[in-house]
Image (tube, rainbow, N blue to C red):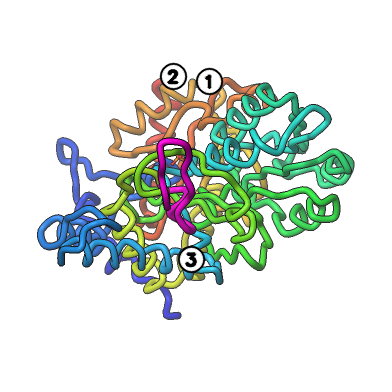
Amino acid sequence: SAPLSVEDIRSDFPILEREFDGTPLVYLDNAATSQTPEPVVDAIVEYYHTYNSNVHRGLHQLSQEASIAYEDAHDRVAEFIGASGEREEIVFTKNATESMNTVAYAWGLEELGPGDEIVLTEMEHHAALVTWQQIAKKTGATVRFIEVDDEGYLDMDHARELIGPDTAMVSVVHVSNTLGTVNPVSELTDLAHEQDALIFVDGAQSVPHMPVDVEAIDADFFAFSGHKMCGPTGVGVLYGKKHLLEEMQPYLYGGMMIEKVTFEDSTWHELPWKFEAGTPVIAQGIALAEACDYLDEIGMDNVKRHGEALAEYAHERLSEFDDIEILGPPADDRGALVSFNLDTVHAHDVSEILNAHGVAVRAGDHCTQPLHDKLGVPASARASFYIYNTREEVDKLVEGLEDARELFA
Ligand code: PMP
């Protein structure tokens, strides 16, 4: 597809025109949440203006329209990530975190026990780490961690050592939200499947930024969030292979997810509704499908190229400072983000000074506390990029950092 016109794209995001006392916003916190383009906002407005209604139950016209749009949204998302089972393999949740909890509770609580091992990586987001840790405590299973090496890559020898006959689940982050590392998920899938283990891939930072094909990866489960990919907050996705979702018991119970209910017992609705208890995320799900259209219009190859080029440029510019430590892999081998520390200034102070320059970055542990502990830093600042960011904005980040350094000199 044609190269991406950042100017055209920016015009779809009115929020990018914001200024603070004359200082324009430079939004570099996209790994936390991306901004929302007009067509996606329009889809939400259109829903509430013209066919807001509950789904699956009403026989009236509005409910039929809402039901069709909501159900079709599942197919659209399935297409976006290469799930040939269409809607049956796509569960809408609240966010990636809820997607993980769904598998941990629905599959993990049932299937895991003493002697079983859950293999994670040291770079897992708390969404996976804390969830599996607690499921392990409840079931008696053991959690093990594939080590991260000095460059920010997974130690694949260690992975081959850890993933063995006792492994029941391998849960790995596709792209690290702290290091920017793009993990070899297909290789990890092969290792898991050779041991008859399942693999759960956390795609929160991959699906927004690169073409993803869950079937090429051969992931058993795959999770991501709408709000990091031009979609609204309040909707996440759980992909699961159809036969696994069919075998699994529901995680949440209530209306909509049942087929037949008596005072004694209940049976479950077909996929994916079995996993969507109560009134689901109707407007958000429909808007997420619109976000898929928006990104496909640009072309995911373009999205990837643009984000990675900005991360590479930022890495190069930050490398010019002797007193900046960059976390993770080299400039030309990372996702669309750069986490770093300025020797003498705490990440929180860095982000405050950058904020005075209009530059929004994240400071903290980015929900990877154990990884920061291992790296020996309490926190880091993170600049993360998306389709509307420019090299000039990276330059503004660097100017802000020069200011921070002077203030604390
Ligand atoms: N995994 C990764 C790698 C993430 O970056 C995030 C968001 N920071 C999550 C999981 C959790 O996403 P959410 O907060 O939308 O559930």
Residue to which mark 2 is pinned: 408
2 and 1 marks in contact (CB < 8 Å): yes
Residue 331 in view = no
**Residue at which label 1 appears:** 344
The residue sitting at 53% across, 20% down in the picture is: 344
The Cα atoms of the two marked residues, 2 and 1, are separated by 7 Å
Q: Amino acid at mark 1?
A: Thr
Tell me where residue 308 appears, x and y as whole percent.
53, 58
Q: Spatial distance from mark 1 to mark 3, Cα to Cα?
A: 47 Å
Please name the residue that numbered disc 3 is placed on. Answer: 78
Amino acid of disc 3: Ala
Residue lying furthest bottom: 1
Q: Nearer the viewer, residue 227 or 155?
A: 227
Give the amino acid type for the residue marked by disc 2 in the picture: Phe
Give the percent coordinates (x, y) of residue 147. 77, 35
Q: Quadrant of residue 159?
A: top right
| Residue 393 position in % (x across, y down) | 36, 50
- Classed neighbour count for the residue bearing mark 2: other residues with Cα under 10 Å, few (<14), some (14–19), many (≥20): few
* Magenta-tinted stretch: 259-276
Q: Is residue 267 magenta?
A: yes
First in sequence: mark 2 vs mark 1: 1
User: Left or right: 40 with respect to 61?
Assistant: right
Q: Is residue 230 above or below residue 352?
A: below
